[in-house]
Amino acid sequence: MLTHAEMTTHGLPHADDVWHGVGVTDRGRVRTSNQDAFAILNECGVWIVADGMGGRAGGDIASRITVDGVADELFQRLGTSLSDSTEIQSRSDLLHQVVHRSNKAVREEASRHPELLGMGTTLVVLMILPRPQPTALIAHVGDSRTYCLRSGVLTQVTRDHSFVEESLRNGLLTEAEAVDHPMRHVLTRAVGAELEVETEITIHALAPQDILLLCTDGLTKMLPDRIVRDILSQPAALPRQMCQALVNEANARGGEDNTTVVLVRKELTKSHQER
């Protein structure tokens, strides 16, 4: 099972093409269980984060089914082969397919166990196509996010699939109204919520020094972007230290939810990779 596991980058043909990720997950200070899940597949350039929902064990089951299903299928399909940026369309199609199958798996599990009806999960899948121009291909559903830190500037790459975010984009709410809106955490999309899942694919060109952050809303509810930026900008910190610092800061500010963070950056040589 690949959930909550890290797979090393052995067997890669081009060390200069290696993007390496590490992750940390934490229950937080309020919740009694952790319904987040993540997977790290450094061999094939794939990283996954999910945030389950659905009462009792439902959220945990939904996120695990989804992350395990996506990770297992992508690893079987890709192996240790890094995708080329000329393959964007075929890889986008693949991501749509695996998310669709995970949506079906979550719904089938719920249909077999009535107490799980209504369970679902957010999902964000990052796939990096390193050659010839490094490109991030991101599939996401819900409000788990991908950020990119470049030259000291933190950019939110994905858009939340939430009532408030979509109302903002459509001019129905102002930024001030959105901050404390009672429906700010209501999702408009989730894996398992509907018969068909609508997956958004984002293509993002990468620079060699970029740091990519995948996270659940346990982080973004507690930390403003400037704090995230400052933690990721520490020049001497290792990726795992930065992950832990983000989680620690979220907990220090209340830890109202489970928090999961995955950091991905380019490694210049194999000897520099953090295990």
Image: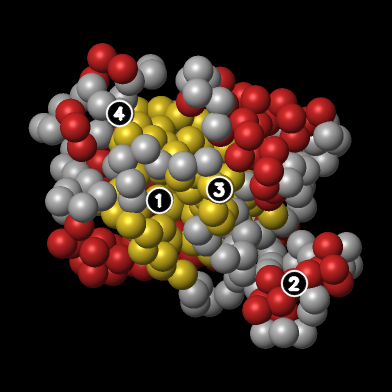
Q: Which mark is residue 126?
A: 1
Q: Mark 4 Cα within 10 Å, few/some/many (few <14, many 20+)?
A: some
Q: Mark 2 Cα within 10 Å, few/some/many (few <14, many 20+)?
A: many
Sequence-wise, which precedes: disc 3 or disc 1? 1
Q: Quadrant of the C terminus?
A: top left
Q: CA distance from mark 2 to mark 4?
A: 37 Å
Label 3 is placed on what type of residue?
A: Leu
Q: Nearer the viewer, mark 3 or mark 2?
A: 3
Sequence-wise, which precedes: disc 4 or disc 3? 3
Q: Which mark is residue 267?
A: 4
Q: Is residue 92 above or below residue 274?
A: below
Q: Is residue 89 visible?
A: yes
Task: Answer with the quarter of the image where residue 234 lies.
Answer: top right
Q: CA distance from mark 1 to mark 4?
A: 17 Å
Label 4 is placed on what type of residue?
A: Glu
User: Could you tell me which secondary element the residue under label 4 belongs to?
Assistant: loop
Sequence-wise, which precedes: disc 1 or disc 2? 1
Q: Mark 3 Cα within 10 Å, few/some/many (few <14, many 20+)?
A: many
Sequence-wise, which precedes: disc 3 or disc 2? 3
User: Could you tell me which secondary element the residue under label 3 belongs to?
Assistant: strand
| Display coloring | secondary structure
| Residue marked by disc 3 | 154
Q: CA distance from mark 3 to mark 1?
A: 17 Å
**Where does the image place residue 259, in percent across and percent down from the top left?**
67, 38
Q: Is residue 138 left or right of residue 117?
A: left
User: Could you tell me which secondary element the residue under label 2 belongs to?
Assistant: helix
Q: Is residue 65 left or right of residue 176?
A: left
Q: Is residue 24 visible?
A: no
Instruction: Residue at 43%, 52% (x, y): give it.
Output: 125
Q: CA distance from mark 1 to mark 2?
A: 24 Å
